[in-house]
Amino acid sequence: MMRLDRALANSGYGSRSEIRKLIRLGRVTVAGQVIRDAAFPISGADVETVRIDGQEKPLHDHLTVMLNKPAGFITAMEDARLPTVADLLPPGWVRTGLVPVGRLDRDTTGLLLLTSDGTLNHRLASPRWGVWKAYRFRYDGPEWTAEDIAAFADGLTLADGQRLKPARLTPLSGHEADLSLHEGKFHQVKRMVQACGREVVRLHRHAFGPLTLDDDLAPGTARLLRQDEIKALRAAVQMDEPAEGIR
Ligand code: URA
């Protein structure tokens, strides 16, 4: 059981005080009944029956978001100087406590997940679970050779001596290549490419575990994940047990 005002705020529909006001004004219904008590208890049976001004507002325990990150934004929820990925999201979502899963550099574009589910975030980012991430990059320097591909597959050693896990390098035309990794060290792609005598000039992430960036999600826009996508993500980090909370 959870209070109605908290359930709506956790689901990204506004701050607690905004929601309480809507409830007081009689604009919120549960299973067709106007509810004027912010503490009205919501159970799993109610998650699809809440409406604000007649519009369905499905409830979520946590929000998990797919963002198509443009260049020029840092992966943080606030910063005194620089634009952050939080600037690209509706304030109601940010208030639920979304945290980016890992990090993309300021100049890197593409798929960034954010979630208010701390356990899911921790596991998706942790080397222990080894979730695959797929990048496409453009580079300066010589074309890749079969030896380079084998070196990535064996596990490269970076300039500072760090030994990396196996990665899949797939050269493409036009000085581009795909790279899949299942770890996420600081500047990892750029440093791997550098360790092989080339330079990344553009970097884009198009997949994270079971999820692929939507073709029609414009840069700078975000959407909530569907239940089937959340299920696939959870399964990738062995969180298959039923979600806790109101569901
Ligand atoms: N590797 C990098 O070097 N930068 C990123 O943003 C992501 C992976």
Image: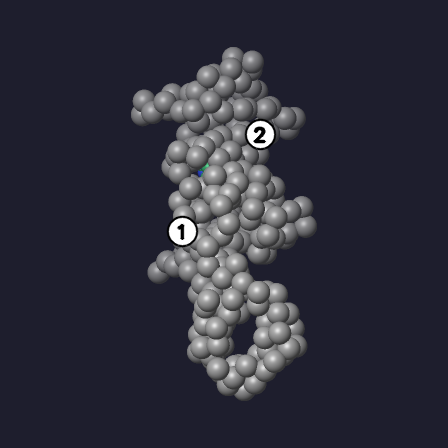
Question: Residue at the spot x=53%, y=18% of the render?
Answer: 149
The amino acid at mark 1 is: Gly
In this rendering, is residue 2 above or below 201?
Answer: below
State the residue position of label 2.
Answer: 178
Residue 241 point in image, percent of width and height: 49, 46
Q: Judge from the rendering whether residue 79 lies leftward or rightward of residue 246; answer left or right.
A: left
Give the mark count: 2
State the residue position of label 1.
Answer: 118
Residue 147 point in image, percent of width and height: 52, 13
Foreground residue among 114 and 160: 114
**Label 1 crowd (10 A; few <14 / some 14-19 / many >=20):** some
Determine the image quadrant of residue 171: top right
Secondary structure under tag 1 reads: helix
The amino acid at mark 2 is: Asp
- Determine if residue 93 is in view: no
- The answer to whether the beta carbon of the residue marked 2 is less than 8 Å from any atom of ligand 1 is no
